[in-house]
Image (tube, rainbow, N blue to C red):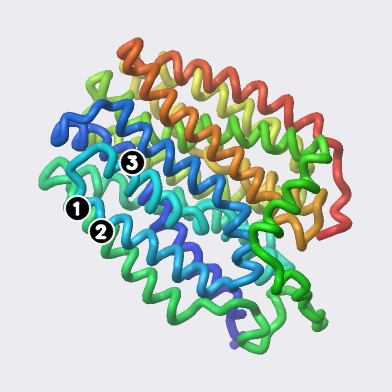
Amino acid sequence: MKRVHYSWFILVVTFFSIIVAGITLSSSGVFINPLEKEFQWERSTIALAFAISLFLYGISGPFMAALLEVIGLKKMMLSAMATLIVGITLTFLMNQSWQLIVIWGGIIGLGASLFLTVLSPYVANHWFVKRRGLAIGILTASTATGQLILLPVLAMIIEHYSWRWAMGLILLLSTLMFTLIAIFIKNKPQDVGLNPYGQEEFIEEQTVQQKKNPIHIAFNGLLEAVKIKAFWLLAGSFFICGLSTSGLIGTHFVSYCISFGVPLVTAASLLSFMGVFNLLGTTASGWLSDRFDNRWLLFWYYLLRGASLLLLPYALSQGSVILLTIFTIFYGLDWIATVPPTISITRQIFGMQKSSIIYGWIFASHQAGAAVAAYGGGLIYQFFNSYTWAFFLAGIFCAMASLFVIIVKKQTPQHV
């Protein structure tokens, strides 16, 4: 029987680590109403805390990529998971809105950063040669898997007990993953006497960056990237990607459904149902990104997402189960499907060594968009007493993103 390559064990532990970090941030939507009721905080204030966490974990991405090069995979994953555990623990002690902003916006946002930004491309680039696109697709889809399994569970716990019990479950899972990371994660394939998966001959690993300052590495990557038009097009499209996914749907979808009379558990179940199709769509997108022009993949992803976002307000206002199901399927397939092709184009343009850091900056733009939508959605609701304009505008922006990506110059994969 052929022995399973250790790269797949790294992928599995990374997969579940991203699930835990992902559910921590994607669960923000189910916590808005209970926090609003218990503490009498304004929705825009709660949304601000969630927006700061989205922005902070995004802007931290390039620095996390640089620290990975300097400190190594295992220590970085352990440090990030420990930070997440501290932040989750502190939520049990908060009673002022500024504490929510510091804890969720700062500590939890920072703890989640590594897992939800550059970890997927780093693991795929360093542990895989063959099936790299598939590996990125699987790791990217892991955020949806946690949402799929845990969001309805968290909603039921909140409804029958309290939000603290729901946070307790996330804390338990985070502690479990800290233990598994400590046991199984290795820095690189050479630590277990192997080459990356699919690499036949031994290639000496480059360690040029190991003694450099991680801040210097991160900003050097940015200075190189800003000179290239494709970087701005990818960053602009990813800003809209973040705005139309984790910022808007991840933060406000549940509350939007509740405003139309949809029960909390049902709304959370719809969001988790998207996770089923997101898991399929993002994994398939990773497979497709190895085989087709990534620009055209992104063009259709953004266009279809925009159409689905324009459909949602109509579906809710009509109370149509059929239209809501159509939205859930189409949006779910497309949620994070943009990530594998974006990573692939970044690697083709900037090469293997620099792609993780530069993708970190592109992802920072993604999270800036997410923060705008998370806070902006709360403001729009406060002003109009409805989220409809937020979803309509997001749909229009997605159509713009489809134009951004299609004018990126076609690349030949000479640096992969």
* Residue tagged 3: 101
Spatial CA distance of label 1 from label 3 is 14 Å
Q: Secondary structure at mark 1?
A: loop
Comes first in the chain, label 1 or label 3:
1
Residue 241 pos. (x, y %): 58, 34
Task: Left or right? Give the position of 269 relative to 63.
Answer: left
State the residue at coordinates (31%, 46%). Answer: 151
Q: Which residue is mark 2?
A: 89
**Pointers 1 and 3 in contact (CB under 8 A)?**
no
Quadrant in the rendering for residue 174:
bottom left
**Residue 330 visible at all:** no
Q: Which residue, given by chain and number where applicable, does mark 1 sit on? A: 92
- Is the residue marked by circle 1 packed among few (<14), some (14-19), or many (20+) residues within 10 Å? few
Q: Residue at x 11, y 47 (%)?
A: 161
CA–CA distance in space, label 2 to label 1? 6 Å
Residue at figure coordinates x 57%, y 73% from the top left: 8
Q: Are marks 3 and 2 in contact (CB under 8 Å)?
A: no
Please state which amino acid type lies under the numbered disc 1: Phe
Query: Where residue 193 sits: x, y (%)?
Result: 66, 89
Q: Quadrant of the C terminus?
A: bottom right
